[in-house]
């Protein structure tokens, strides 16, 4: 038996049914693509039946939606906590910028799969994801605006553009970052956050 097959079978037996399904779907979607992976292949890799899958997920669409949704929910929880800290706004923006990079890299397959396949979701699911992501961006933007109002950040660049610029870089991570390279996720998070803050400082 091949090592990869043994590893997949060992993973299939761990965790709750939803966890096993999501783990299997993430691996298969990353390897084969969303379109080329069948529900039968997902349930076989997860070691469950179709009936068990449909108890938790109504369709393959729902698996794709949840793969990204769980990451976005986690990042939103982190951002809510960071934004409520009683520290200077620059520290909060730095921490938030670092966190979204670190968590995106830690869940890179999830993000890559979703952005590659989001257009294949049903329209209502696409709208739901965009709405949830917009809430995250709006909270991040509100901290940038606070820094601008306090004179901590430059105000000649619209906060919306700052958010679009930064998150464009975040969404691009999957095209170049490789595990095991010279930079860890923490390194990249710190560097990106430092660059963001440096770019926001008022010009002298």
Image (cartoon, helix red, strand yellow):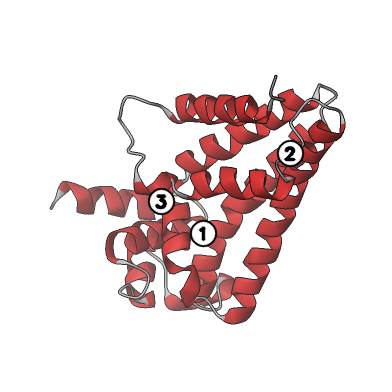
Instruction: Please say if 44 is above or below 184.
Output: below
Residue at which label 2 appears: 156
Along the polypeptide, which appears first: circle 1 or circle 3?
Answer: 1
Question: In 3D space, how far apart are the residues under numbered discs 2 and 1 (Cα atoms)?
Answer: 38 Å
Residue that lies at the very extreme toward the front in this rendered image: 204
Q: Position of residue 163 (x, y in %)?
A: 65, 46
The quadrant where residue 148 appears:
top right
Mark 2, other Cα within 10 Å: few <14 / some 14–19 / many ≥20: few
Residue that lies at the very extreme toward the top in this rendered image: 204
Along the polypeptide, which appears first: circle 3 or circle 2?
Answer: 3
Q: Residue at x 58, y 42 (%)?
A: 166
Q: Position of residue 14 (x, y in %)?
A: 43, 49
Q: Position of residue 57 (x, y in %)?
A: 55, 72
Residue at which label 1 appears: 67
Question: In 3D space, how far apart are the residues under numbered discs 1 and 3 (Cα atoms)?
Answer: 9 Å
> Who is closer to the viewer here, 172 or 116?
172
Residue at which label 3 appears: 109
Mark 3, other Cα within 10 Å: few <14 / some 14–19 / many ≥20: some
The quadrant where residue 133 appears:
bottom right
Q: Secondary structure at mark 3?
A: helix
Quadrant of the rendering where the C terminus is positioned: top right
Question: In 3D space, how far apart are the residues under numbered discs 3 and 2 (Cα atoms)?
Answer: 36 Å
Q: Secondary structure at mark 2?
A: loop
């Amino acid at each position: 038996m091949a090592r990869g097959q043994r590893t997949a079978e060992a993973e299939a037996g761990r965790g709750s049914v939803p966890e096993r399904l999501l783990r299997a779907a993430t691996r298969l979607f990353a390897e084969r693509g969303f379109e080329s992976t069948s529900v039968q292949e997902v349930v076989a890799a997860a070691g469950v039946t179709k009936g068990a899958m449909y108890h938790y997920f109504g369709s393959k669409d729902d698996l794709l939606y949840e793969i990204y949704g769980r990451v976005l929910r986690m990042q939103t929880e982190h951002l809510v906590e960071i934004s409520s800290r009683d520290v200077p706004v620059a520290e909060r923006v730095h921490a938030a910028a670092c966190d979204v990079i670190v968590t995106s890299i830690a869940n890179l397959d999830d993000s890559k799969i979703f952005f590659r396949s989001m257009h294949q979701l049903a329209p209502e699911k696409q709208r739901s994801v965009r709405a949830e992501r917009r809430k995250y961006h709006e909270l991040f933007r509100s901290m940038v605006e606070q820094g601008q109002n306090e004179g901590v950040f430059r105000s000649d660049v619209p906060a919306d553009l700052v958010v679009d610029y930064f998150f464009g870089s975040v969404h691009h991570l999957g095209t170049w970052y490789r595990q095991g390279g010279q930079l860890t996720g923490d390194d990249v998070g710190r560097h990106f956050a430092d660059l963001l803050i440096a770019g926001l400082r008022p010009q002298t």
